[in-house]
Image: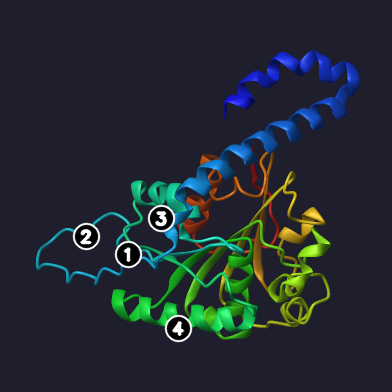
Amino acid sequence: MKVTGVLPLFLPFYRRLWPGRLADLSMALLKATALEVAILAGHLLLYPTGLTQERRVPALPAQEGATPLPGRSAPPVVLLHGFIDNRSVFVLLRRNLAQNGRQRIESLNYSPLTCDIRNAAELLGRHIEEICVRTGSGQVDIVGHSLGGLIARYYVQCLGGDLRVRTLVTLGTPHSGTRVVPLASAHPIVRQMRPGSEVIEELSRPAPGCRTRFVSFWSDLDSVMDPLETACVDHPDLDAQNVRVSGIGHLALPVHPAVAAGIREALDTAHLEGGRSGGLTVA
Protein backbone atom coordinates (compact mmCIF):
# COMPACT_ATOMS: atom_id res chain seq x y z
CA MET A 1 0.00 0.00 0.00
CA LYS A 2 2.84 2.45 0.78
CA VAL A 3 4.17 2.13 -2.75
CA THR A 4 0.99 3.61 -4.23
CA GLY A 5 1.39 6.70 -2.07
CA VAL A 6 4.77 7.45 -3.67
CA LEU A 7 3.60 7.04 -7.26
CA PRO A 8 2.28 10.61 -7.77
CA LEU A 9 5.84 11.92 -7.24
CA PHE A 10 6.90 10.16 -10.43
CA LEU A 11 3.87 11.17 -12.50
CA PRO A 12 5.58 14.02 -14.42
CA PHE A 13 8.50 11.74 -15.26
CA TYR A 14 6.22 9.02 -16.65
CA ARG A 15 4.23 11.54 -18.66
CA ARG A 16 7.42 12.76 -20.33
CA LEU A 17 8.28 9.20 -21.28
CA TRP A 18 4.75 8.18 -22.33
CA PRO A 19 2.65 11.18 -23.37
CA GLY A 20 -1.10 11.45 -23.10
CA ARG A 21 -3.28 8.40 -22.69
CA LEU A 22 -0.34 5.99 -22.73
CA ALA A 23 1.06 7.69 -19.62
CA ASP A 24 -2.27 7.34 -17.82
CA LEU A 25 -2.49 3.68 -18.79
CA SER A 26 1.07 3.03 -17.61
CA MET A 27 0.39 4.70 -14.28
CA ALA A 28 -2.84 2.75 -13.83
CA LEU A 29 -0.98 -0.49 -14.53
CA LEU A 30 1.79 0.44 -12.10
CA LYS A 31 -0.71 1.27 -9.36
CA ALA A 32 -2.64 -1.94 -9.97
CA THR A 33 0.57 -3.97 -9.83
CA ALA A 34 1.60 -2.34 -6.55
CA LEU A 35 -1.83 -3.10 -5.11
CA GLU A 36 -1.59 -6.72 -6.29
CA VAL A 37 1.78 -7.12 -4.55
CA ALA A 38 0.39 -5.66 -1.32
CA ILE A 39 -2.66 -7.91 -1.44
CA LEU A 40 -0.53 -10.96 -2.19
CA ALA A 41 1.69 -10.22 0.81
CA GLY A 42 -1.32 -9.88 3.09
CA HIS A 43 -2.95 -12.99 1.69
CA LEU A 44 0.16 -15.08 2.26
CA LEU A 45 -0.05 -14.15 5.94
CA LEU A 46 -3.73 -15.15 6.10
CA TYR A 47 -3.39 -18.26 3.95
CA PRO A 48 -2.70 -20.70 6.84
CA THR A 49 -5.91 -19.62 8.58
CA GLY A 50 -7.97 -20.92 5.68
CA LEU A 51 -6.39 -24.34 5.21
CA THR A 52 -9.08 -26.18 7.18
CA GLN A 53 -12.72 -26.36 6.29
CA GLU A 54 -15.00 -23.85 7.97
CA ARG A 55 -16.81 -25.08 11.06
CA ARG A 56 -20.48 -25.56 10.25
CA VAL A 57 -22.93 -24.02 12.71
CA PRO A 58 -26.40 -25.63 12.73
CA ALA A 59 -29.20 -23.22 11.95
CA LEU A 60 -31.03 -22.15 15.09
CA PRO A 61 -34.83 -22.59 15.09
CA ALA A 62 -36.70 -19.30 15.08
CA GLN A 63 -38.19 -18.43 18.46
CA GLU A 64 -41.91 -17.82 18.60
CA GLY A 65 -42.68 -14.11 18.32
CA ALA A 66 -39.08 -13.20 17.47
CA THR A 67 -38.45 -10.50 14.90
CA PRO A 68 -36.55 -11.86 11.86
CA LEU A 69 -33.06 -10.46 11.42
CA PRO A 70 -32.44 -8.20 8.41
CA GLY A 71 -31.57 -10.27 5.37
CA ARG A 72 -32.68 -13.53 7.02
CA SER A 73 -34.99 -14.33 4.07
CA ALA A 74 -32.13 -14.05 1.59
CA PRO A 75 -30.52 -17.32 0.46
CA PRO A 76 -27.22 -18.36 2.02
CA VAL A 77 -24.14 -17.02 0.22
CA VAL A 78 -21.52 -19.61 -0.74
CA LEU A 79 -17.97 -18.33 -1.35
CA LEU A 80 -15.73 -20.44 -3.60
CA HIS A 81 -12.02 -19.64 -3.99
CA GLY A 82 -9.71 -19.92 -6.99
CA PHE A 83 -6.82 -22.15 -8.08
CA ILE A 84 -4.38 -23.23 -5.29
CA ASP A 85 -6.11 -20.84 -2.92
CA ASN A 86 -8.45 -21.30 0.06
CA ARG A 87 -11.30 -19.59 1.88
CA SER A 88 -8.98 -17.02 3.50
CA VAL A 89 -9.17 -14.97 0.28
CA PHE A 90 -12.72 -13.99 1.26
CA VAL A 91 -12.02 -12.64 4.76
CA LEU A 92 -12.78 -9.01 3.84
CA LEU A 93 -15.67 -9.79 1.49
CA ARG A 94 -17.30 -12.03 4.07
CA ARG A 95 -17.05 -9.31 6.70
CA ASN A 96 -18.47 -6.75 4.24
CA LEU A 97 -21.46 -8.96 3.41
CA ALA A 98 -22.14 -9.74 7.07
CA GLN A 99 -22.02 -6.06 8.04
CA ASN A 100 -24.59 -5.31 5.36
CA GLY A 101 -27.26 -7.79 6.36
CA ARG A 102 -26.18 -11.17 5.04
CA GLN A 103 -26.67 -13.51 7.99
CA ARG A 104 -25.79 -16.84 6.37
CA ILE A 105 -22.42 -17.05 4.63
CA GLU A 106 -20.52 -20.27 3.90
CA SER A 107 -16.89 -20.47 2.70
CA LEU A 108 -15.96 -23.73 0.99
CA ASN A 109 -12.53 -25.22 0.37
CA TYR A 110 -11.73 -27.67 -2.38
CA SER A 111 -8.43 -29.55 -2.43
CA PRO A 112 -5.42 -27.91 -4.13
CA LEU A 113 -4.87 -31.38 -5.62
CA THR A 114 -8.15 -31.16 -7.53
CA CYS A 115 -7.45 -32.11 -11.13
CA ASP A 116 -10.91 -32.03 -12.74
CA ILE A 117 -13.44 -29.21 -12.85
CA ARG A 118 -16.25 -31.74 -13.35
CA ASN A 119 -15.39 -33.63 -10.15
CA ALA A 120 -15.06 -30.37 -8.22
CA ALA A 121 -18.49 -29.30 -9.51
CA GLU A 122 -20.04 -32.59 -8.33
CA LEU A 123 -18.50 -32.08 -4.88
CA LEU A 124 -19.82 -28.51 -4.84
CA GLY A 125 -23.28 -29.87 -5.60
CA ARG A 126 -23.12 -32.17 -2.56
CA HIS A 127 -22.03 -29.24 -0.39
CA ILE A 128 -24.92 -27.14 -1.70
CA GLU A 129 -27.44 -29.88 -0.90
CA GLU A 130 -26.07 -30.15 2.64
CA ILE A 131 -26.26 -26.37 3.09
CA CYS A 132 -29.86 -26.29 1.88
CA VAL A 133 -30.88 -29.10 4.24
CA ARG A 134 -29.07 -27.53 7.21
CA THR A 135 -30.39 -24.01 6.66
CA GLY A 136 -33.84 -24.89 5.37
CA SER A 137 -33.27 -22.78 2.27
CA GLY A 138 -34.27 -24.00 -1.17
CA GLN A 139 -31.60 -21.96 -2.95
CA VAL A 140 -28.19 -20.36 -2.47
CA ASP A 141 -26.22 -17.55 -4.04
CA ILE A 142 -22.61 -18.26 -5.04
CA VAL A 143 -19.64 -15.91 -5.35
CA GLY A 144 -16.74 -17.60 -7.14
CA HIS A 145 -13.28 -16.16 -7.66
CA SER A 146 -11.34 -17.24 -10.77
CA LEU A 147 -11.45 -21.06 -11.05
CA GLY A 148 -14.12 -21.13 -8.32
CA GLY A 149 -16.48 -19.31 -10.64
CA LEU A 150 -15.84 -21.82 -13.43
CA ILE A 151 -16.52 -24.76 -11.10
CA ALA A 152 -19.76 -23.14 -9.97
CA ARG A 153 -20.81 -22.41 -13.54
CA TYR A 154 -20.22 -26.04 -14.55
CA TYR A 155 -22.39 -27.15 -11.61
CA VAL A 156 -25.15 -24.74 -12.60
CA GLN A 157 -25.08 -25.29 -16.34
CA CYS A 158 -24.14 -28.97 -16.71
CA LEU A 159 -25.20 -30.70 -13.47
CA GLY A 160 -28.64 -29.20 -12.86
CA GLY A 161 -27.40 -26.72 -10.27
CA ASP A 162 -29.68 -24.00 -11.65
CA LEU A 163 -32.39 -25.52 -9.42
CA ARG A 164 -30.34 -24.58 -6.35
CA VAL A 165 -28.36 -21.48 -7.39
CA ARG A 166 -30.36 -18.26 -7.63
CA THR A 167 -27.47 -15.95 -8.54
CA LEU A 168 -23.89 -16.83 -9.50
CA VAL A 169 -21.40 -13.97 -9.19
CA THR A 170 -17.98 -14.61 -10.75
CA LEU A 171 -14.83 -12.57 -10.17
CA GLY A 172 -12.12 -12.83 -12.82
CA THR A 173 -13.33 -16.21 -14.09
CA PRO A 174 -12.04 -17.48 -17.47
CA HIS A 175 -15.46 -18.32 -18.93
CA SER A 176 -14.07 -18.75 -22.45
CA GLY A 177 -10.64 -19.98 -21.35
CA THR A 178 -7.40 -18.11 -20.72
CA ARG A 179 -4.05 -18.45 -22.49
CA VAL A 180 -1.93 -16.92 -19.72
CA VAL A 181 1.24 -18.72 -18.46
CA PRO A 182 1.56 -21.54 -21.03
CA LEU A 183 3.96 -23.47 -18.78
CA ALA A 184 1.20 -23.89 -16.20
CA SER A 185 -0.56 -26.28 -18.59
CA ALA A 186 1.35 -29.11 -16.94
CA HIS A 187 -1.46 -29.10 -14.36
CA PRO A 188 -4.61 -30.90 -15.65
CA ILE A 189 -7.06 -28.35 -14.26
CA VAL A 190 -5.14 -25.50 -15.90
CA ARG A 191 -5.46 -27.33 -19.23
CA GLN A 192 -9.21 -27.41 -18.64
CA MET A 193 -9.14 -23.60 -18.32
CA ARG A 194 -7.58 -23.18 -21.77
CA PRO A 195 -9.63 -21.99 -24.77
CA GLY A 196 -10.99 -24.96 -26.68
CA SER A 197 -10.74 -27.47 -23.81
CA GLU A 198 -13.52 -30.04 -23.38
CA VAL A 199 -14.84 -28.23 -20.31
CA ILE A 200 -14.95 -24.84 -22.06
CA GLU A 201 -16.61 -26.50 -25.05
CA GLU A 202 -19.27 -28.06 -22.78
CA LEU A 203 -20.03 -24.64 -21.29
CA SER A 204 -20.53 -23.19 -24.77
CA ARG A 205 -23.28 -25.69 -25.60
CA PRO A 206 -26.97 -24.67 -25.55
CA ALA A 207 -28.44 -24.28 -22.07
CA PRO A 208 -32.13 -23.56 -22.66
CA GLY A 209 -34.19 -22.78 -19.58
CA CYS A 210 -31.23 -22.19 -17.25
CA ARG A 211 -32.76 -20.49 -14.20
CA THR A 212 -29.63 -19.03 -12.60
CA ARG A 213 -28.77 -15.36 -13.03
CA PHE A 214 -25.09 -14.69 -13.80
CA VAL A 215 -23.18 -11.54 -12.84
CA SER A 216 -19.56 -11.52 -13.98
CA PHE A 217 -17.05 -8.94 -12.73
CA TRP A 218 -14.10 -8.50 -15.07
CA SER A 219 -11.14 -6.13 -14.77
CA ASP A 220 -9.43 -4.16 -17.51
CA LEU A 221 -6.07 -4.84 -15.76
CA ASP A 222 -6.49 -8.53 -14.96
CA SER A 223 -3.19 -10.13 -15.95
CA VAL A 224 -4.55 -13.67 -15.47
CA MET A 225 -7.22 -13.26 -18.15
CA ASP A 226 -5.93 -13.55 -21.73
CA PRO A 227 -7.86 -12.14 -23.48
CA LEU A 228 -9.45 -9.84 -20.91
CA GLU A 229 -12.95 -10.46 -22.28
CA THR A 230 -12.73 -14.14 -21.40
CA ALA A 231 -13.91 -13.12 -17.93
CA CYS A 232 -17.28 -12.11 -19.44
CA VAL A 233 -20.19 -14.53 -19.76
CA ASP A 234 -21.10 -14.66 -23.44
CA HIS A 235 -23.85 -17.24 -23.95
CA PRO A 236 -27.21 -16.66 -25.69
CA ASP A 237 -29.16 -18.89 -23.27
CA LEU A 238 -27.89 -17.39 -20.01
CA ASP A 239 -29.29 -14.40 -18.13
CA ALA A 240 -25.95 -12.67 -17.67
CA GLN A 241 -24.64 -9.24 -16.76
CA ASN A 242 -20.97 -8.39 -17.25
CA VAL A 243 -19.61 -5.69 -14.96
CA ARG A 244 -16.39 -3.93 -15.91
CA VAL A 245 -14.02 -3.04 -13.06
CA SER A 246 -11.38 -0.39 -13.76
CA GLY A 247 -7.86 -0.08 -12.39
CA ILE A 248 -7.40 -3.22 -10.30
CA GLY A 249 -5.91 -6.65 -10.93
CA HIS A 250 -6.94 -10.26 -10.42
CA LEU A 251 -6.14 -10.60 -6.71
CA ALA A 252 -7.92 -7.36 -5.84
CA LEU A 253 -11.32 -8.50 -7.14
CA PRO A 254 -12.43 -10.33 -3.95
CA VAL A 255 -10.89 -7.62 -1.75
CA HIS A 256 -11.73 -4.23 -3.24
CA PRO A 257 -14.58 -2.37 -1.46
CA ALA A 258 -16.11 -1.10 -4.72
CA VAL A 259 -16.36 -4.67 -5.99
CA ALA A 260 -17.89 -5.76 -2.67
CA ALA A 261 -20.54 -3.06 -3.08
CA GLY A 262 -21.23 -4.32 -6.61
CA ILE A 263 -21.54 -7.89 -5.33
CA ARG A 264 -24.03 -6.80 -2.66
CA GLU A 265 -26.06 -5.01 -5.32
CA ALA A 266 -25.98 -8.08 -7.56
CA LEU A 267 -27.18 -10.34 -4.75
CA ASP A 268 -29.89 -7.94 -3.60
CA THR A 269 -31.26 -7.07 -7.02
CA ALA A 270 -34.19 -9.09 -8.33
CA HIS A 271 -33.96 -10.67 -11.73
CA LEU A 272 -34.37 -7.91 -14.29
CA GLU A 273 -35.90 -8.41 -17.70
CA GLY A 274 -33.43 -7.82 -20.45
CA GLY A 275 -30.46 -7.95 -18.05
CA ARG A 276 -28.25 -9.80 -20.49
CA SER A 277 -25.82 -6.96 -21.16
CA GLY A 278 -23.55 -5.26 -18.67
CA GLY A 279 -23.89 -1.53 -18.40
CA LEU A 280 -22.54 -1.08 -14.89
CA THR A 281 -18.95 0.00 -14.38
CA VAL A 282 -17.12 -0.23 -11.07
CA ALA A 283 -14.34 2.35 -10.79
Are discs 2 and 1 less than 8 Å apart at CB? yes
- Left or right: where 226 falls relative to 173: right
Disc 2 residue crowd, few under 14, some 14–19, many 20+, Cα 10 Å: few
Amino acid found under the numbered disc labelled 3: Thr
Instruction: Name the quadrant containing residue 133.
Output: bottom left
Amino acid found under the numbered disc labelled 1: Ser
Amino acid found under the numbered disc labelled 4: Arg
Front residue of this view, candidates 125 and 33: 33
Instruction: Measure the C-alpha gap from mark 4 to mark 3.
Output: 24 Å
Where is 143 relative to 134, above or below?
Answer: above
Instruction: Measure the C-alpha gap from mark 2 to mark 1.
Output: 8 Å
- Left or right: where 224 falls relative to 87: right
Name the residue that disc number 4 marks.
126
Please give the name of the residue rendered at 58% of the width and 37% of the height, measured from the top-left corner.
38
User: Regarding mark 1 in the picture, which secondary structure is present there?
Assistant: loop
Numbered mark located on residue 211 in the image: none
Name the residue that disc number 2 marks.
68
- Dot 4 or dot 3: first in sequence order is 3
Locate the C terminus and report the quarter of the image it occupies: top right
- Dot 4 or dot 1: first in sequence order is 1
Name the residue that disc number 1 marks.
73
Name the residue that disc number 3 marks.
49
Front residue of this view, candidates 37 and 220: 37
User: Regarding mark 3 in the picture, which secondary structure is present there?
Assistant: helix
Q: Nearer the viewer, mark 4 or mark 1?
A: 4
Disc 4 residue crowd, few under 14, some 14–19, many 20+, Cα 10 Å: few
